[in-house]
Image: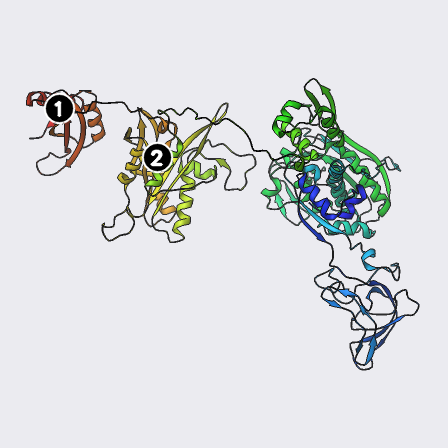
Amino acid sequence: MQFSEHWLRQFVNPSLDSQGLSHALTMAGLEVEELEPVAPDFTKVVVAEIISAEKHPDADRLQICKVNVGAAEPLQIVCGASNARAGLKAPCALVGAELPGFKIKQAKVRGVESFGMMCSAKELGMAEESDGILELAADAPVGQDIRELFDLNDKLLTLKLTPNRTDCLSIVGIARDVSALTGASLQLPVIQQVPVSHTHQLAVKVHEPSASPRYAGRLIQGVDANAATPDWMMRRLERSGIRSISAIVDITNYVLLEQGQPLHAFDADKLQGGIQVRYARQGEELLLLNDQQLTLSDDFLVIADDQGPLALAGIMGGEASAVGDTTRNIFLESAFFDPAVIVGKARRLNFSTDSSYRFERGVDFGNTVQALERASQLVLEICGGQAGTVTEVLHQLPQRPAVHLRLGRLNSVLGITLDATLVAALLKRLDFQFTQVADGVEVTPPSYRFDIKIEEDLIEEAARLHGYDNIPALAPQDEQRMLPSPESRLNRNSLRDSLAASGYQEIVSYSFVDESWERDFLGNANAIALKNPIASNLGVMRTGLWAGLMETLIYNLNRKQERVRLFEIGSAYFAEDAGYREVGRISGLAYGGAEPEQWAVAAREVDFFDVKTEVDRLTHGRAQYVAGQHPALHPGQTAQILVNGQAIGWIGKLHPKWQQHYQLPRSAILFELDIEPLLQSQVASYVQVGKFPPVRRDMAVVVDESTSIQALIDTMRTSKNTLISDIALFDVYQGKGIAEGKKSLAFLVLMQDTQKTLTDAEADAVMAELLDLLAQQHGAALRN
């Protein structure tokens, strides 16, 4: 929000200089991002009138001018500007004047004495480029200082407002805050009802009362659309970063800046029938004032007539009903639109407007008609015309429930003591309505303060008005004690440490993804759609974390990083009848060489089993792998991961179609796990150390090649024989001596008794038991 300091001081003029005012605003939460003069410093430049202009005898492009500067005698000045002529009023720098970058001295120009210089806007620092000397209005007082004429001692303040302070997107709103902060009196513009000169009205029908709870308009006839915008208004607009267009448009922009209420003027003679506020019909078209042709969808709120849409409500008007040079009758609109209806619409169209910026954050619904009266007042003063009665359609406005502020809570948060009298005085300075209650106050926020909703909002108001400088910085005092940390519950950092130790790097990505990604890559046709996506390709909530990993992989490959190890810890979101369910996930990706390039190890690509090792480490060896199918993963190299019989995630090689889609030279290995089961750890318990040697027996069995190794190991472990300390696979064989469709699996079995040395008979009995289990459940036979 950029504005003129002098404009603000017309409403409230505290006894602070520019720097002091800037500091006060910043310390009150309205950060002044920039404070700069409207023009560079210069001195002794006055309004002058050229009495005569004659050609220089020794130069074709120079003229000798007699110039009236308000002194007893006119000055002789040699001027090279092509537009210098008798009767013209222009700035004149007198001898001794200091302009940006140089000083004016008496001089001879081609042998002719010159006692000053006629100035262009560029030479005064008022413009980057200029063509000739600056031409002034015919009624400019001769001899007046140019700085006074153009109010060049003014300064520009640029506020960096937080989104909650929409009330300060207007000069009136900022003035209210300055008055509350400094105690200076507030002198707001007096807004009175303009005299009604005719009874003509346009019929207004609001089809969507929840989207537009308040809509007001007025027909003003006989306006002069070619009237000149007053210099004071044009200057204030330009210093707020708004270009002057025409008097009527400038008035609506001026009221926008002054009151914070966006308005729009329609050429009433171009309207067909009455005004309708409704949602667009699918496929309706509208040409905006910025020449953008739109095909509307049915979630755009429009202002329409009997023929079709005239404007995008709260965003921009249409070209068909725009005010032009021939306009004689206007319909002036002032409305309150629900922020939820406006938010994100302009961004979807790839532009932003001052109106949409305010409407999507919330404007003062209590000032709608007052702003209309203010604009009407200015139209009649500047453009003439006759005003009709105000047409207003009013429905249920937003409720402003009272907010309870407890003094005890206030003092606890601020760390100081503010009594009830002081708190009441602070609230009065803000012009808040409140009532005293036993433990504090009940505050009813005004309609222009959308940000006051909870107790903490009032605590913030009390703190900033009391002054952050008046709150001492005291070191907190608290008893430090160890919090309980059960060994059966791990910290998420242990998962990070595990992957980081293996060379993986953590990333953080958006929880928003493209709908096509969810549908095609993760097989989810019921993604949670966002009402207001930050980008068209980030329209739904993710149900998996692989999107961020793949984007980061491609980013790295484009920068010649050939070996990539990535992981992310984040949330996935699943739609449910009652809303959504959030699940913590850890996801990883490995790409490129299995080991960093080196001389001691032969180069090979990372494979399924390399990544499976990381998953085993994360699950503390509890993971089970069951062959499965996933739309993102290779049909023959995909496994669902189970812990204690519950599915917790997936591991596999990237599907060839996705490898081709992303134009990857080689494939990647991906995994994703629910976090919660990984944080559950078995508490270590004491086991007696065996004093007697273990016994190892090997067993080779032949089974169908479709039988998984894990299934055999799980079956042997179901025996729960206390003598068995470990079972592991050490060989897989298919070929000569093994029937087709079969495979030979060799297992080692370690046995130990902590009380005695095992005998051969006891070891043979254990092996026989295991073989019997495998034969019964998997048809295994001992290999000859």
Give the side of residue 478 with respect to residue 259, left or right: left
Give the side of residue 434 with respect to residue 360, left or right: right
Give the side of residue 783 with respect to residue 617, left or right: left
Q: Quadrant of residue 308?
A: top right
Q: Residue furthest top?
A: 438
Residue 624 position in % (x across, y down)? 28, 29
Q: Quadrant of residue 430?
A: top right
Describe the element under mark 2 as helix, strand or loop: loop
Describe the element under mark 1 as helix, strand or loop: helix
Q: Which color mode does the image show?
A: rainbow
Amino acid beneath label 1: Leu
Which residue lies under the disc numbered 1?
Answer: 771
Q: Nearer the viewer, residue 700 or 451?
A: 451
The answer to whether residue 283 is above or below residue 74 is above
Tell me, for residue 355, which label it has, or none.
none
Residue 464 position in % (x across, y down)? 67, 35
The answer to whether residue 405 is above or below residue 352 is above
Which residue lies under the disc numbered 2?
Answer: 630
Q: Nearer the viewer, residue 501 or 717?
A: 501
Task: Count numbered badges in the picture.
Answer: 2
Q: Residue furthest right?
A: 72
Look at the image and tell me whether residue 654 can be seen.
no
Q: Nearer the viewer, residue 305 or 486?
A: 486
Within-10-Å neighbours for mark 1: few <14, some 14–19, many 20+: some
Q: Nearer the viewer, residue 716 or 246?
A: 716
Q: In 3D space, how far apart are the residues under numbered discs 2 and 1 (Cα atoms)?
A: 35 Å
Quarter of the N terminus within the rendering:
top right
Amino acid beneath label 2: His
> In terms of sequence position, does the residue under pointer 2 or pointer 1 come before the other?
2
The answer to whether residue 58 is above or below residue 295 is below
Residue 137 position in % (x across, y down)? 85, 59
